[in-house]
Image (cartoon, grey):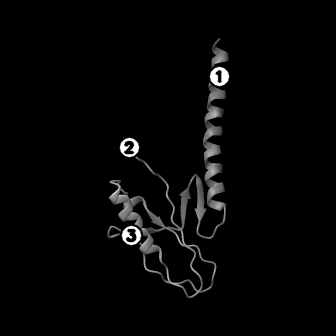
Amino acid sequence: MWKFVDDTTVSEVIGKDQTSNLQNQMDILANSISSHKLQLNETKCKEMGICFGSNVNGFQPITINNITLDIVQNAKVVGLHRANNLKWNIHVNEVIKKCRKRLYHLTQLKRASIGLKGLL
């Protein structure tokens, strides 16, 4: 029997002049995963902060099993590209890129079918 979990997201809302409790939560999560004999791929874990205030707090980087998580400006979460400024530009550009690839393949199929009609 195999157990599998993918794309788990942990988040926290931190008020002004408060401290983060996320490192403690990540330690609990890592211990829980280990105790259930599951394996966590720390290199795939990322940290992304969202802040609209003028004074961005310098929180300590999050670590899992003594590995510091990469801090990213955007991440793909459940199929949506999310940016730390909560704008949709990156997601829309990725959708357009995927549409262009599929449209190109359709035009190639159409050209191939036209070429085959000329041979018959």
Q: Which residue is mark 3?
A: 27
- Label 1 crowd bin: few (<14), some (14–19), many (20+), radius 10 Å: few
Q: What residue is drawn where x is 56% and y is 83%?
A: 56
Q: Position of residue 72 (x, y in %)?
A: 50, 67
Task: Tell me, yes or no, if residue 69 can be seen here.
Answer: no
Position of 85 relative to 60 (above/below): above
Q: What residue is drawn where x is 65% and y is 44%?
A: 99
37 or 64: nearer the viewer: 37
Q: Position of residue 8 (x, y in %)?
A: 49, 58
Amino acid type, residue under disc 1 in the picture = Ser
107 or 19: nearer the viewer: 19
Position of 14 relative to 89 (above/below): below
Label 3 or label 1, whichever lies nearer to me, is 3
Amino acid type, residue under disc 2 in the picture = Trp
Q: Which residue is mark 1?
A: 113
Amino acid type, residue under disc 3 in the picture = Asp
Q: What residue is drawn where x is 55% and y is 64%?
A: 74
N-term mark: 2 or 3: 2
53 or 4: nearer the viewer: 4
Q: Which residue is mark 2?
A: 2
N-term mark: 2 or 1: 2
Residue farthest toward the top in the current orientation of the protein: 120
N-term mark: 3 or 1: 3
